[in-house]
């Protein structure tokens, strides 16, 4: 009898292990099936958009409205599908990170190495500009240098998986790589310059005095099934947060695509208009959007003859220097530091805009 009693916990443990393996296999199999279905639908989006526009809605072919509606019906599901796939993959990657781990990785690093690491972490960590205040407080109280913190805060909203997915899907690998590379350079150099200027005295006193907890909070060990679930939860969270911007952005892009003459955009945002880059930055700063909302507009502008450098400058200013973000940051930064931040980042964006208008 004692032998059977001793074997019972072992058998139960073995059943749990088998059950966990079956559940993990089911999750992985389901994910693979979802990807295959995704691919089949994605390959037929163009035909579907034409069918919806000209067969279901009976719009006359060759009209401005027809071009605009076809653009909308093609780009909206395309963007949603690309975003879902990439965010799911990055969501699994994010399950290995937490804000506490991020602070621990950045604290104590030498300045320039810290700027590089902070900008790279901004790509894969689950933060956006709306998280600036709590993150800033956490980073500063954890001993992360001010310039390193700014490198992270510039890169996180501007250079992330949403940008990769949308730019690659809508504009191709070359433009996606250009944007990601220049965005990282701006984040690294702007943070390094802010660090060299020693502007810590312009952080609000209550932030410096805050008793932050710099220790890392241990995470429960996650199984691969947990990480897959976390990936889907990340998809629901991000899609839920940005879908309205995507719809509005694609609608604006569709209107530009269908109704705005090519020569018009080329004349005001083309290479020959030297003032187009600073004007694009000035227009972009007060706008309230995110990467999901602005990229479809960028796609349409490029298609109508706008210069690449001017469009990149516009996009970066909308994402990295939005007025709402500056208002949020005012809670923790004094005006002089915010002004320095705007000038440094805007200067980097202007350089990028002019450089690519010259080179491409």
Image (cartoon, rainbow, N blue to C red):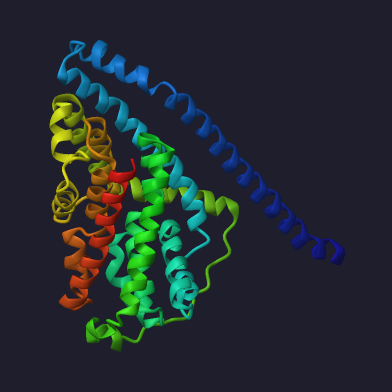
Q: Quadrant of residue 53?
A: top left
Residue 18 image position (x, y, % from top left) = 70, 49
Q: Is residue 59 above or below residue 100?
A: above
The residue lying toward the viewer, choosing from 55 and 178, is 178
Image quarter (top left, top right, bottom left or bottom right) of the C terminus: top left
Residue 187 image position (x, y, % from top left) = 35, 63
Q: Quadrant of residue 350?
A: bottom left
Residue 108 image position (x, y, % from top left) = 48, 81
Residue 255 image position (x, y, % from top left) = 16, 30
Q: Is residue 287 above or below residue 295?
A: below
Residue shown at 31%/30% (left/top)? 75
Q: Is residue 91 above or below residue 150?
A: above
Residue extending farthest to the bottom is: 209
Residue shown at 16%/34% (left/top)? 265
Query: Can the viewer see residue 230?
Result: no
Residue shown at 50%/34% (left/top)? 34
Q: Is residue 56 left or right of residue 124?
A: left
Image quarter (top left, top right, bottom left or bottom right) of the N terminus: bottom right
What number of labels is visible?
0
Residue shown at 49%/70% (left/top)? 101
Query: Can the viewer see residue 321?
Result: yes
Q: Is residue 136 above or below residue 49?
A: below
The residue lying toward the viewer, choosing from 305 and 82, is 305
């Amino acid at each position: 009898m004692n032998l059977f009693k001793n074997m019972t916990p072992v058998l139960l443990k073995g059943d749990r292990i088998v059950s966990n393996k079956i559940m993990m296999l089911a999750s992985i199999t389901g994910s693979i099936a979802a990807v295959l279905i995704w691919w089949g639908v994605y390959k037929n989006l163009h035909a579907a958009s034409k069918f919806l526009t000209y067969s279901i809605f009976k719009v006359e072919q060759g009209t401005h409205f027809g071009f605009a509606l076809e653009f909308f019906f093609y780009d909206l599901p395309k963007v949603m599908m690309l975003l879902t796939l990439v965010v799911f993959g990055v969501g699994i990657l994010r399950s290995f990170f937490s804000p506490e781990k991020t602070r621990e990785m950045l604290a104590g690093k030498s300045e320039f190495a810290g700027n590089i690491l902070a900008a790279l972490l901004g790509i894969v960590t689950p933060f956006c500009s709306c998280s600036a205040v709590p993150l800033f407080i956490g980073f500063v109280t954890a001993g992360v240098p001010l310039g390193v913190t700014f490198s992270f805060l510039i890169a996180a909203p501007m250079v992330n998986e949403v940008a990769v997915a949308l730019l690659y899907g809508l504009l191709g690998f070359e433009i996606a790589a250009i944007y990601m590379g220049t965005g990282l350079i701006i984040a690294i150099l702007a943070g390094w310059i802010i660090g060299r200027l020693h502007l810590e005295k312009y952080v609000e006193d209550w932030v410096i005095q805050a008793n932050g907890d710099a220790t890392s909070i241990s995470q429960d060990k996650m199984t691969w099934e947990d990480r897959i679930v976390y990936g889907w939860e990340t998809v629901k969270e991000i899609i839920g947060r940005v879908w309205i911007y995507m719809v509005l952005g694609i609608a604006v892009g569709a209107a530009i695509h269908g109704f705005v003459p090519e020569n018009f955009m080329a004349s005001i945002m083309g290479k020959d208009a030297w003032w187009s880059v600073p004007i694009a930055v000035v227009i972009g700063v007060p706008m309230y959007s995110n990467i999901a909302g602005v990229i479809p507009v960028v796609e349409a502008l490029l298609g109508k003859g706008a210069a690449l450098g001017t469009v990149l400058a516009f996009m970066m200013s909308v994402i990295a220097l939005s007025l709402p973000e500056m208002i949020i940051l005012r809670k923790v930064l004094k005006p002089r530091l915010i002004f320095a931040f705007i000038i440094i980042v805007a200067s980097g964006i202007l350089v990028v805009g002019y450089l690519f208008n010259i080179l491409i």
